[in-house]
Image (cartoon, coloured by chain):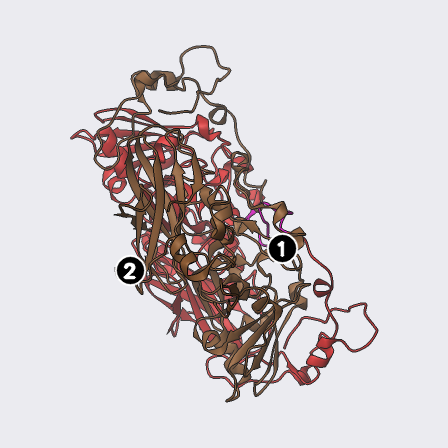
Chain colours: A red, B brown
Amino acid sequence: MSKGSGVKGTDETGPSRRQLLMGGLAAGAGLAAGGLAARSAAAGGEKLITEIQDWNRYLGPGVDEQPYGAPSAHESHVVRRNVAWLTADPKSSVNFTPLHELDGIITPNGLCFERHHGGIAEIAPADHRLMIHGLVETPLVFTMEDLRRFPRENHVYFLECAANSGMEWRGAQLNGCQYTHGMVHCVMYTGVRLQHLLEEAGLRTNARWLLAEGADASAMTRSIPLEKALDDCLVAFSMNGEALRPEQGYPLRLVVPGWEGNMWLKWLRRLEVGDQPWHQREETSKYTDLLADGTARRFTWQMDVKSVITSPSPQKPVTHGRGPLVVSGLAWSGGGRIARVDVSIDGGRNWRTARLDGPSFTKALHRFYLDLDWDGSELLLQSRAIDEHGFVQPTKNELRAVRGENSIYHNNGIQTWHVKADGTSENVEVS
Amino acid sequence: MSKGSGVKGTDETGPSRRQLLMGGLAAGAGLAAGGLAARSAAAGGEKLITEIQDWNRYLGPGVDEQPYGAPSAHESHVVRRNVAWLTADPKSSVNFTPLHELDGIITPNGLCFERHHGGIAEIAPADHRLMIHGLVETPLVFTMEDLRRFPRENHVYFLECAANSGMEWRGAQLNGCQYTHGMVHCVMYTGVRLQHLLEEAGLRTNARWLLAEGADASAMTRSIPLEKALDDCLVAFSMNGEALRPEQGYPLRLVVPGWEGNMWLKWLRRLEVGDQPWHQREETSKYTDLLADGTARRFTWQMDVKSVITSPSPQKPVTHGRGPLVVSGLAWSGGGRIARVDVSIDGGRNWRTARLDGPSFTKALHRFYLDLDWDGSELLLQSRAIDEHGFVQPTKNELRAVRGENSIYHNNGIQTWHVKADGTSENVEVS
């Protein structure tokens, strides 16, 4: 049952303390979950570790060696990955969060997916400014220090690119949840309510919209309705406790909870208040949803209720035999909290309720598990999320019936992994 | 009011779009909080940024450059720091979390303080085992894969070294909350309830205690009462979503919520069940509290209710003038949730209630703020935490009256920063 092999030490002078201790033990036996009886794998050829391991014999590195720590060398496969053919240049491309290797709901800052339109703006924070102008009583310019003098708030939110799962509109394409669903991350933000800054400038009575602009080479812009800006938007300077990462907008980004990631302006430098939307490139030719009849859905800001099983999945095969198998996944909704997640092992014919675990925040990732007693046969694994407002994640075909297959955005369809008897999985569609 | 200076671009060909946009603006004016009127600093010599900045002119790095990201070069001062004179060797020493630079309640994995007794064990996870033996029906050995087949849970907990603030027993010593309080961190753990593993092995009726042992060069051991082990302890393999960091016990650590960090065995390899404590070195000569009369408090596991103001503080001076000042800090209790934090600006004579912000988890850090209108005069800043059971953080002198000054452990006394009119601070004591 266990696959690890023993480490060979170099001390051949006699039986070690560990040898003595482990003389009578059943190895790899600890495998009951959900009421299963314990089984001993002692007869299964398990190789006992009978000598002192090197890390127990020799002193390791001290506390002066890594002022800012890094993952173990054994975790070097846990990285963001990009797809070279996806765009003309990596400066206007995307990479993907390795969801299949993560657990819980917090994404480590170094693994949050990136999407740039002109590469990463590398900003000296002392030279950064945020300007608020337009339909305001007093146009204002803030330094970073100015912003840190306003009352702060902390919130955990997911950020999902509108194009996440976009390749799946025309059928199962990419083999792994990192690629199909990895344009999402979830961190704790610290920042100032946008409402406070707008009130400081004083909104004129005809103010209805906001244009947010980044300081990067693409000078990204998006129109945001003022109602949202005054509701729950933040101007954030920290993520997971520390300063924003450069690729996430250092030193300042707009946080637009539950709405598509493109609107969360990075390297935020300008907020213009107006009475109508600006119809910029990134909200007309891009980030609109072309329907089958040639018309386009516009201003589809909110990210719909969605989920995906992260393990097992094509990049995360089952490497053990039948018996206890932890099915793990993520669910989220731009509308609020997740109320329930269902999991099917037969392609959607039968469903059982998954166990939601860990904190439940509005507009954040939620972790779910199904603790399965796997009989070793093949599975058609699916998850289906339901949010607090009763919205249910649809099948891909239900989505296509309404929206056609022309779009790349806002695909929240149910994902299917075909888990085979050998533990490997494939991205498939069931009809 | 603002200290940033303009960036000089190289384009001298005429007024830029930004020059035009910013022609009529009051700079650095956005500074009202808590009902203060907006003030214009345009007369204060603020240098406007009037040319296009380099990061807006040139394409930046693409998505293929950093598979695992890192902080901005402008944040290179945000690091763990050790104190060379504290111990004989950095392999048996400690470094400190830069609390003064962090916000929210999540500590990024790369900044979690370290404490080692034989350096960092660098473990190959496939060769790691966890053994459970002693007063059990079936001794068991688990591989990492075995452990991942048990039901998982996610929890946010603080971890504090018993010696945190230990230098302060004999008076104000170290100038900065990184050094006085930086042996604490807070992350989201993913792991398996220890209870499940012990039930799998089957506890004998006379089982009362657990000995936990690490696989590092010091083979650290601690005795833990079974009642705690069966209550809320976890065997964790992830922190903040990814695998544990090597210096935090990769691939497996014991999580002992609310109890002193020394018991959270890193590189966990062995759990022995017994009927009494083992009285090992780290729970007799160390991690006991020598009192004034020469007797020692033993088994003082739980970390008491505590708080500290992280900004302003000696390492984080106020760099702006009078007016809105955000006082920010952390509070925690090994007994559960924080119910309230009070802040004093006059050395404990008068108190006002701070604003708790962000999620409140049991046995986790809590972030608090006091949004102050600073008149520019000097302050004696203190914070005092109260937990859900009504325990109140004592003054240092109240602690000394009961415990003397011989110990280095379990100092949860109220910390004072003397903030001067020029914005710098010092670690002081008030009587």
Tell me the CA gap for discs 1 and 2: 41 Å
- Give the extent of the magenta segment: A63-82
Q: Quadrant of residue B386?
A: bottom left
- Whether A185 is among the magenta residues is no
Percent across and percent down for residue B135 are 57, 85
- Residue at image mark 1: A72
Q: Residue furthest right?
A: A13
Q: Which residue ends up furthest to the front in the rendered image?
A: B293
Could you say whether the residue bearing mark 1 is in a helix, strand or loop? loop
Tell me residue A19's x, y (percent). Answer: 73, 78
The relative height of residue A349 versus residue B105 in the rendered view (above or below) is below
Residue A418 visible to the viewer: yes
User: The C terminus of chain A appears in which quarter of the rendering?
Assistant: bottom left
Most extreme residue toward the top is B13
Amino acid under disc 1 = Ser
Find numbered disc 2 in the image and state the secondary structure of the residue it sits on: loop
| Disc 2 residue type (three-letter) | Phe
x and y, in percent, of residue B257 in the image: 45, 65
**Residue A391: mark:** 2
Q: Residue at x 52, y 58 (%)?
A: B406
In the rendering, at what x and y percent does residue A107 appear?
Answer: 47, 53
Left or right placement of residue A264 versus residue B122 in this view = left
